[in-house]
Amino acid sequence: MTERPQFPPVFQAYAVTADLDPFERAVDMAKSGTEAGTLLWSARQDVYESAIVLAPENSLEASLPVIMAAGLGLGDALGALVPPVVAVTFGWPDRIELNGAAVGRIRLILPETPNPTAVPEWLVVGFNLANAGYWQEGPNDERQTTTLNEEGCQIDLLDLLEAFGRHFLAWINRWQTDGVQPVQQAWMSRTLEVGKPITIEVDGKRREGTFKGLNEQCGLELDDHGRHQVIPLDLAVEISSLT
């Protein structure tokens, strides 16, 4: 009998118990020099969680669009598993939506890096996805939320993990081969926010404006009453202390 879940050979996969955060564990392993491709997932059933350790080859700024590639990988995985009537969309920089309501997010954690041109020693990327029960994105977040169960999506965790591993790797390969533009364009085709007023909280501050698009580094471009603003991705990701 084949053991599940099954991942592409580049991943070395391990389950963690439901009481552990796979992201915290992955960060600890990354700091200890674990091999790139280490993939952890949680045994929790109310929230599906998975984290992957990667070894960037490019600068911090050039590595950050991995959050978009992971979103596309999860979006493609969900698209293959949810009913056809359920729409899978994105919100910048990390939100995953079902039928317009937030169901989870992509998480990206990097070590403290002296400057955007330096190459990070590691990064951890993955997802949190609400399967059942009440949840909230953040203490001040007023967006509508949902769960897989609420949207009629009965998805097995192992099926989701296997599909995510395949699709995420496909987007990483596309990014490495063709550059960031295909990733950016595919992500933009799945957001409902273009041309609409949005409010983003970054670095403890609320930014408001009309969503105009993404720049070459996948930073958010806003029009604030005729004033052009760009919110770079590095303000929207977690930075891990190395101490």
Image: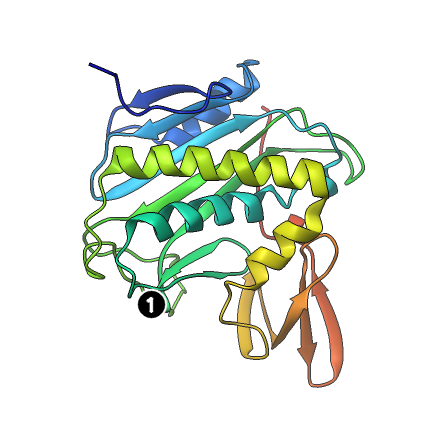
Q: Is residue 201 left or right of residue 12?
A: right
Q: Residue furthest bottom?
A: 225
| Residue at image coords 74%, 30% | 119
Residue 25 occupies quadrant: top left
Q: Residue furthest right?
A: 117
* Display coloring: rainbow
Name the residue carrying label 1. Answer: 99
- The secondary element bearing badge 1 is classed as loop
User: Where residue 14 appears, x then y in whole percent?
Assistant: 35, 19
Along the line of sight, the residue nearer the viewer: 71 or 226: 71
| Residue at image coords 19%, 59% | 152
> Against 29, is 19 above or below?
below
> Against 190, is 56 above or below?
above
User: Where residue 226 appears, x then y in whole percent?
Assistant: 74, 84
| Residue at image coords 56%, 20% | 36
Image quarter in which the N terminus is found: top left
Q: Is residue 146 left or right of residue 175?
A: left
| Residue at image coords 27%, 61% | 146
Image quarter in which the C terminus is found: top right
Kind of residue indicated by mark 1: Asn
> Against 129, is 1 above or below?
above
Residue 172 occupies quadrant: top right
The answer, for residue 45, to whether it is visible in the render is yes
Q: Is residue 117 left or right of residue 125?
A: right
Residue 67 occupies quadrant: top right
User: Where residue 3 appears, x then y in whole percent?
Assistant: 25, 17
Is disc 1 surrounded by few (<14), some (14 to 19) or many (20+) residues within 10 Å? few
Along the line of sight, the residue nearer the viewer: 230 or 66: 66
The answer, for residue 204, to whether it is visible in the render is no
